[in-house]
Image: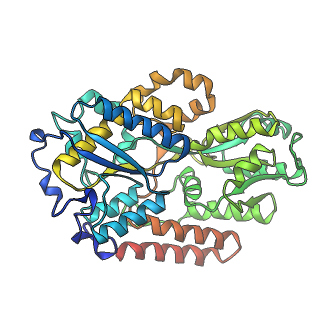
C-alpha cells in the first residue's frame, strides 16, 4: 500500500479542505503544550438521525456550556456514511470543505490520512497537558483503539462500537428439540433445515418458514469468515485474502442452504428483522445496534416469544466476532482548532458522557469503566449485556483505503457465488480485482 497517495490522485494538493484553513500541514502541529484553544469553533460532521442525533446535539450543547476554553462545537448531519465519504472527497478536491471533525470508517480515514487531510491523534493522546493519564489510557478498550491505529498513527478515535450478532428464536429452537443456539456451522445448517420442515407455532404466516435470511452485505460475510478462523486481509494488512478456504466455506454453505430452500436472500432493507420478529425465520445475523428494534418489533408483533443473541457459529474453541463502527477523525486545520476538536473528543468519551450515549444509541462504550454507570441499563436490556460480555472476542475488518470499493466487489461476488457460478472463478476474480485496487 502506498502511503501518502491522494484520493483519486488529487487530494495531496488540497490540505486546506478540512477546517476551511489554507496552507496547513500535519507538521504545523508542533508544540501542543503551548497551544491555546480559547474560543475555537469546531464543525462536526456526523451521520446520526432521530433519537441519536437528538442525544448527540444535547451532548454537544452541554460541552459548549461547560468547557472552560470557550470552545464552540456545531454538529451537522451530512447524510449516511457513503454520503459523508463522497462529500469529503469532493470538498477536499475543491478546497471547500468546512469540517473540523468527521465521522469515518477506518478505510475512509486511511484515504484521508494518505492525503494529509486528517491528522495523527496520537500526539494529543500522549500530551502531558491535554492527553490521558496512564489510568485513563488503560480504561479504553485497547482493541477499539487499535482498529484506528495504522503504523503507529492514530487516524481516528472511537466514540462507540457495534458487533455482528446471531439473533435466535429460543422458543422455536425448543420446538425443534434444542435448548441453545448453534455452536458450529453444522448445527446451524441442521437447525435451518428443521425450521423449514416445522414452522414456528406462533408464526403469523406458516406458509413461509425458513432458517435464515442472507443479507448481501460484506460485514455479514466477514463475520462468517472470522468465525471460521479466517480474515479478509493478510497479517500486515497489505493485501486482500478473499480466495481462501474460509471465504469459500462460508459461501458454499450459504449456496447449499439456499439451493435446498431452507434459507433465502434478504430482498429489501430490514427484511431479516421484519421476518424474525414475526416468527418466519429462526435466525438473523445483524448488528448489535439493532437490539432495540428487535425488542420493540417482537413486542409489537404480539407473538411474545423468548429470543436471544450470541456470537455467530464457530469452528474453533474461542469465539471471534466482527466488531465495527465509525470513528471520528480530526481534520487538518490550524493547530489551535485541531486541539479544540481533540478536547471535545476526549470529553465525549469520558464515562459519564459514554453512559448517556449508550442509553440513547445502544452502541457499546469505548471506556471500560462506563460499565459501572450502566448496571441499571444492563438489567433493563439483558440482551445488550450478553453482547457486551463478548467484546473481548472482537476482530475488525480491513483498514486498507480501498476497502470501500472492495466491499462492493465482495457483495457482487456473494451474489455470483450463491447463484451457482463457478466458485473457483468467482473467488479468483474477486481476489485479483480487490488487490488491483491497492495498486491504483
Q: In terms of image quadrants, where is residue 118? A: bottom left
**Would residue 217 appear left or right of 400 to someone viewing this image?**
right
Residue 243 appears in the figure: no
Q: Quadrant of the C terminus?
A: bottom left
**Would residue 350 appear left or right of 26 to someone viewing this image?**
right
In the rendering, at what x and y percent does residue 217 appear?
59, 60
**Would residue 322 appear left or right of 29 to someone viewing this image?**
right
Q: Residue at x 37, y 72 (%)?
A: 438
- Compared with 261, 328 (above or below) is above
Q: In terms of image quadrants, where is residue 122? A: top left
The chosen color scheme is: rainbow
Q: In terms of image quadrants, where is residue 291? A: top right
Q: Residue at x 51, y 41 (%)?
A: 52
In the rendering, at what x and y percent does residue 301 appear?
80, 40
- Compared with 271, 66 (above or below) is above
Residue 57 appears in the figure: yes
Q: Quadrant of the N terminus?
A: bottom left
The one nearer the camera, 356 or 143, is 356
The one nearer the camera, 262 or 73, is 73
Q: Residue at x 35, y 45 (%)?
A: 74
Q: How many marks?
A: 0
The one nearer the camera, 169 or 189, is 169
In the rendering, at what x and y percent does residue 110 appear?
33, 60
Amino acid at each position: 500500500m502506498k502511503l501518502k497517495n491522494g484520493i483519486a490522485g488529487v487530494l495531496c494538493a488540497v490540505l486546506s479542505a478540512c477546517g476551511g484553513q489554507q496552507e496547513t500541514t500535519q507538521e504545523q502541529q508542533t508544540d501542543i503544550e503551548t497551544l491555546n484553544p480559547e474560543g475555537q469553533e469546531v464543525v462536526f460532521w456526523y451521520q446520526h438521525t432521530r433519537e441519536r442525533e437528538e442525544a448527540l446535539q444535547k451532548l454537544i450543547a452541554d460541552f459548549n456550556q461547560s468547557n472552560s476554553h470557550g470552545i464552540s462545537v456545531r454538529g451537522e448531519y451530512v447524510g449516511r456514511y457513503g454520503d459523508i465519504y463522497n462529500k469529503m472527497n469532493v470538498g477536499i478536491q475543491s478546497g471547500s470543505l468546512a469540517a473540523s471533525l468527521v465521522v469515518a470508517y477506518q478505510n475512509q480515514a486511511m484515504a484521508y490520512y494518505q492525503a494529509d487531510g486528517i491528522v495523527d491523534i496520537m500526539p494529543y493522546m500522549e500530551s502531558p497537558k491535554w492527553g490521558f493519564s496512564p489510568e485513563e489510557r488503560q480504561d479504553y478498550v485497547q482493541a477499539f483503539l487499535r482498529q484506528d491505529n495504522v503504523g503507529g498513527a492514530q487516524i481516528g478515535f472511537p466514540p462507540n462500537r457495534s458487533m455482528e450478532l446471531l439473533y435466535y428464536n429460543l422458543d422455536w429452537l425448543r420446538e425443534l428439540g434444542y435448548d441453545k443456539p448453534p455452536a458450529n456451522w453444522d448445527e446451524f445448517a441442521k437447525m435451518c433445515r428443521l425450521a423449514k420442515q416445522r414452522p414456528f407455532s406462533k408464526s403469523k404466516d406458516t406458509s413461509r418458514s425458513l432458517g435464515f435470511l442472507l443479507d448481501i452485505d460484506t460485514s455479514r460475510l466477514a463475520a462468517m469468515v472470522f468465525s471460521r478462523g479466517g480474515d479478509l486481509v493478510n497479517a500486515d494488512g497489505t493485501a486482500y485474502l478473499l480466495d481462501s478456504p474460509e471465504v469459500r466455506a462460508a459461501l458454499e454453505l450459504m449456496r447449499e442452504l439456499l439451493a435446498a430452500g431452507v434459507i433465502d436472500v434478504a430482498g429489501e432493507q430490514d427484511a431479516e428483522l421484519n421476518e424474525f420478529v414475526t416468527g418466519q425465520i429462526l435466525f438473523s445475523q445483524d448488528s448489535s445496534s439493532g437490539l432495540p428494534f428487535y425488542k420493540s418489533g417482537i413486542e409489537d408483533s404480539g407473538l411474545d416469544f423468548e429470543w436471544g443473541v450470541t456470537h455467530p457459529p464457530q469452528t474453533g474453541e474461542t469465539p471471534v466476532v466482527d466488531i465495527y463502527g465509525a470513528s471520528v477523525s480530526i481534520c487538518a486545520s490550524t493547530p489551535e482548532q485541531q486541539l479544540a476538536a481533540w478536547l471535545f473528543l476526549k470529553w465525549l468519551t469520558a464515562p459519564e458522557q459514554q453512559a448517556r450515549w449508550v442509553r440513547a444509541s445502544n452502541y457499546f462504550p469505548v471506556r471500560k469503566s462506563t460499565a459501572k454507570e450502566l448496571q441499571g441499563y444492563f438489567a433493563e436490556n439483558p440482551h445488550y449485556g450478553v453482547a457486551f460480555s463478548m467484546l473481548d472476542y472482537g476482530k475488525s475488518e480491513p483498514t486498507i483505503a480501498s476497502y470501500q470499493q472492495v466491499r462492493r466487489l465482495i457483495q457482487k461476488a456473494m451474489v455470483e457465488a450463491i447463484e451457482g457460478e463457478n466458485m473457483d472463478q468467482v473467488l479468483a476474480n474477486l481476489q485479483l480485482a480487490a488487490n488491483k485496487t491497492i495498486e491504483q
